[in-house]
Every structure is written in C-alpha cells, then in structure tokens.
Amino acid sequence: MKKITILALCCIAIDQFIKWIITHAIAFMEEIFVIPNFFYITNVRNYGAAWSILDGNRVFLIFMAFFCLALIYYFFIYQQKLSRREVLGYGLLIGGIIGNLIDRMLLGYVVDYIGLIFFGYHYPVFNIADMCIVSSVIIIFYHFWKERKKDETDNQHHGRSFRKN
C-alpha cells in the first residue's frame, strides 16, 4: 500500500501543479497551439465527467469518486499481494481520481487543458489526472489478461500431466 500511496501522491502533485500553472498563465478558453492543427494547451472547465457527461452533477460525481476509491481499496488492494504492474495501475488510478476530485470539491469543476485534433476532429480536452486514469485502466486490464493467459497455460500444462493414456 505504501508504494501505491507514494505513486498516487506523485500523480496528484504533478496534476495539481500543472493545473495551477495553467489557471494562472492561460486565460479561460484561450488556446495556445504547440503543434498547429494537432496539439494545443488551453484552460477550460469541465462541470461533468469524461466528455462532460453528467454535466452539473457535482455532488453525485464527488460521491461516486469516494465510492470508487473505497471499492478499489476494499476489493483490489486491501490484504492483497500485488504485482508491480498492479501497484502501478492502482497508484495511477487512485492518483487520477483524487486529482480530479480535488478540483471538483474545491472549484466545483475540473480544470482541463490538453487539446488534440485528429483529422479535423477536436478530441475532448483532458488533463494529467485523466491520462493517469486511462493509463491505469489499460495497465490493469493488461495485467488481468496476462494473469488469465498464465492460468490457462498452467491449467493446460497440469491437465496433460495427469491425463491417463
């Protein structure tokens, strides 16, 4: 749990520091293109969750964040022997959830600032906490997939060992 906590705190610190810089250096709704027609930095407010779903449901989103943190801890971390991959995944996930939770509780919205354009499509603006959450889900699913494959291989191997000819 110690490594997960340290990783989560690092994610939170980086996320909150960058959000502080963005809100103090870039005017609300201003766009600064780093790579023309592809990557820009902006300062927008998200009153919902991903892609602004549940827009305006601040109390519900705060409750859900705490609920998810409790579920993650109780079902996946508490009294578990975790692999390095799981520690990385859960540390990023918890850090990302808390990073956005802090904004939602203190500001009433989440500060988003990374903008991407793909083939003319303006992808929804996001932040480091969002990147931590998405990365963690990929890592955790990959871990479960690898473990399932390993279990299947072990079961096949052991099944052949005990088979009568």
Image (spheres, rainbow, N blue to C red):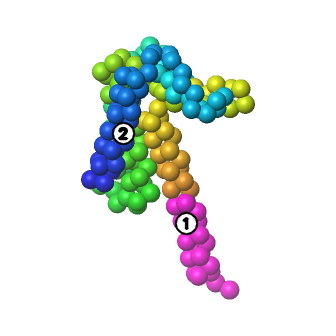
Q: Position of residue 75 (x, y in %)?
A: 37, 46
Q: Amino acid at mark 1?
A: Lys
Where is residue 127? Give x, y as percent. 47, 32
User: Mark 1 — residue?
Assistant: 150
The answer to whether residue 164 is visible is yes
For image coordinates 39% across by 33% down, the residue present is 18
Q: Which residue is mark 2?
A: 14
Residue extent of the magenta highlight:
146-165
Which label belongs to residue 81? none
Q: Is residue 61 magenta?
A: no
Q: In this rendering, is residue 59 above or below 165? A: above
Residue 149 inside the magenta-drawn segment: yes
In this view, the residue farthest toward the top is 56
- Looking at the rendering, in which quadrant would you find the C terminus? bottom right
Q: CA distance from mark 2 to mark 1?
A: 35 Å
Q: Secondary structure at mark 2?
A: helix
Q: Which mark is in front, 2 or 1?
A: 2
Q: Compared to 165, does 14 lie above or below? A: above
Q: Residues within 10 Å of mark 2 (few under 14, many from 20)?
A: some
| Disc 2 residue type (three-letter) | Ile
Toward the viewer: 6 or 90? Answer: 6
Q: Do labels 2 and 1 touch, CB within 8 Å?
A: no
State the residue at coordinates (30%, 21%): 106
Q: Residue furthest right?
A: 119
- Above or below 119: residue 85: below
- Residue drawn at x 49%, y 50% as measured from the top left: 140
Q: Secondary structure at mark 1?
A: helix
- Seen at 43% across and 35% down, the residue is 129
* Classed neighbour count for the residue bearing mark 1: other residues with Cα under 10 Å, few (<14), some (14–19), many (≥20): few
